[in-house]
Amino acid sequence: MLRERLKKELLIFDGAMGSMLQKYGMKAGEIPEVYNIEHPEMIIDIHKQYLKAGAHFITTNTFGCNPLKMQESGYCYCDLLKAAVKNAKKARDEVNPDAYIVLDIGPIGQLLEPLGTLRFDEAYEMIASQVLMVKDDVDAVLLETMTDLYEVKAGILAVKENSDLPVFVTMTFESHQRTLTGTDPLTFVNVVEGLKVDALGVNCSLGPVELLPIVKTILKYASVPVIVQPNAGLPCLEHGHTCYPMKSDEFVEAMKEYAQLGVNIIGGCCGTTPEFIAGLKEHLPSYSQPREVLPYTAVSSAHQTVLFEGQVVVCGERLNPTGKKKLKAALKEGNYEEYVKEAIQQQRAGADILDVNVGLPGIDEKQVMVTVLKMLQEVIDLPLQIDSSSPEVIEKACRYYNGKPLINSVNAKEEVMEAIFPIVQKYGGVVIGLTLQDGIPLYADERLTLAKKIIQKAKTYQIPSKDIIIDCLTLTASAQQKEVQETLKAVSLVKNELSLYTTLGVSNVSFGLPHRPLLNRTFLALALQAGLNLPIINPLDQQLMDTIDAYRVLSYQDKDAIQYIEKQSQHTVQPVFPTTDFTLHDIIIHGLKDEVKAKTQELLQTKQALEIIDQIIIPALNQVGDDYENNRIFLPQLIQSAETTKLAFEVIKSTFHQQDAAKATVVMCTVEGDVHDIGKNIVKVILESYGYQVIDLGKDVKKERVVEAYQKYHPQAIGLSALMTTTVVHMQKTIQALKEAHCDCPIWVGGAVLTADIAREIGADYYCQDAMATVTLLQDIL
């Protein structure tokens, strides 16, 4: 019933819980979930107010109700969770028995690997335990205020594998239209839709005005219902308390545009109250506006999506041990860094997607594939193609891959389709369909028939044709010369009759013949003209890449030849570095932690330590910072580079005198009442990579302890962090205490609820939006 209503009606969610509890007297630093047991009457009353205002959904007071966040609550999270659901049911039964109760699950509070230490399976088990505990007493599950796409995936699987409940997901985006960990709206939609959620959207961080461009992108690509829950504008400080300035009538007026655009579920987040929800119920239509979403084919990493859209997309073929002694040896020895270095080369050379194959006798292919994928995703932003003949390997790889992968492959054999298609259906992905059954057909029309068979079988698994790319299979000109033309004909038939994208392993055509590069690029040009979209090639072959660049101009894909002119005007071939020739600069840029110590030690044989720092490490870090600020890399790569730099400094520090070990000392903490320390921990890692000594006081730190740390360590700067609106007042009190103690060093503040204006109002000297802004500040003032 609920799933059917989502398709037609405009449904109303409730608003903020925390803002309401503050009105009821909840003090800064108190844990809202504890009120489920200690003050159930307050929670029930808040639910009732939202129901009376017209909300179709009420969310349980369980945003942080997981084993990690509730450790210091004095209660078992299980009891708090059950009490929350009991309170919601009591309110619903008394006001509107037809309303829906939604289990609210917020971020766990720790970053998942590789950003943090929390494993994917640990996150899965934590969320699964919450779902299993109350699944019979709620109507849906909401994963909300998410910043990490990998945690989102763990959560979706935990809900779907342990219940039949509808699952909604909302992520929180910053003003630059990415989440904290770097996911953009298109990538979010592409990945989460593939995992078969019932609704997706955005909440928190921004107000209705600021969220609009993000939501427009989501609406362009999302075929499932879209949910929007903005804050009541951007936060400000009034009388020492964080407030949200937008009035209910302003909020409702802004949300009318969302309804007109086709949003299916509308509610509120921080700063919204029952008055806001009543306004939405009164002034918004009861049915959602229909919207047309054109089908698209795309694959994603956690931070980047490759849309096909008729463009030529290059898949790099070199991460495959076949015919590569170095990769075979690396797999046998467990030296997977060779795969990472090979991947970096292909990314530099212009590949859009990287094929990953680890098939080798004598190794645990499932475990090695997962390990290699994780290592690649720490360093490479490109989407990956999971390449294996084993359904078990593909299934495990799809489970742990962070994104929507390309899957290589399925063919027209019944047993193969029955093994592969359930994996594609469950995890999402774009699958390559090989036009073979009992061998490769000689003629193009036979290959077309097999392509149709694959498409029809996929439909029985609810896999749309947009998520299938057909491989018409390249035959060798040395053995089957006539059939080369049949391959090209098959590509044209698939394109023209089925309107599907196609792929070919280009270099197969030249096997066994001399001067293979000439044959490869000639065949590539013919295949592109026939309609080839995804050539699987060696991107380090500059002539092949030049052929594609030229084709893009002549086929009007590269309008005004802008990209072609830019590349060709350089008059030099882009250098391709052998895997053994990475410099320390390259190693830091790409975060090659396994390489950095040996390279640093090697350089110390010929260079002074300070020379290495000033001429290599700092310029590399500056490039990393610039790439991060300009969205060329994202948080995982930033942290990977920072941790790599720390390892270089460990080697260099051994040559220093103790007093020269750090450029400056800073004290950092999350202020009293706030148990969120992800942002603070990120800043710490980055600062340490730049050579600062960081005294980390931890989270929920009282002002007296900060003053003691100032007096003990005599830092050159102090950094304070807060995520919760209720703890900004403690930040202000900490700053006041430091000034009363005659603190003469600069104090900077940061955190999701802060702005430059709030920073000034509470007495801070500086405001930093993120880790790199902190680095820039300290470099300027110290």
Image (cartoon, rainbow, N blue to C red):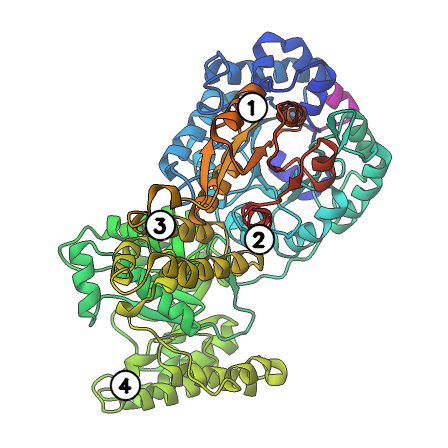
N-term mark: 4 or 3: 4
Q: Amino acid at mark 1?
A: Val
Q: Is residue 50 magenta?
A: yes
Give left or right: position of 387 versus 459.
Answer: left
Q: Residues within 10 Å of mark 2 (few under 14, many from 20)?
A: many
Q: Amino acid at mark 2?
A: Asp
N-term mark: 2 or 3: 2
Where is mark 3, residue-wise? 649
Q: Amino acid at mark 3?
A: Phe
Where is mark 4, residue-wise? 510
Give left or right: position of 601 versus 186.
Answer: left
| Mark carried by residue 184 | 2
Tell me which segment is drawn in magenta.
49-56
**Residue at x 45% of width, y 14% of height:** 76
How far is the residue under mark 1 from the one under mark 4?
72 Å
Is disc 1 in contact with disc 4, using a CB cutoff of under 8 Å? Answer: no
Q: Nearer the viewer, mark 2 or mark 4?
A: 2
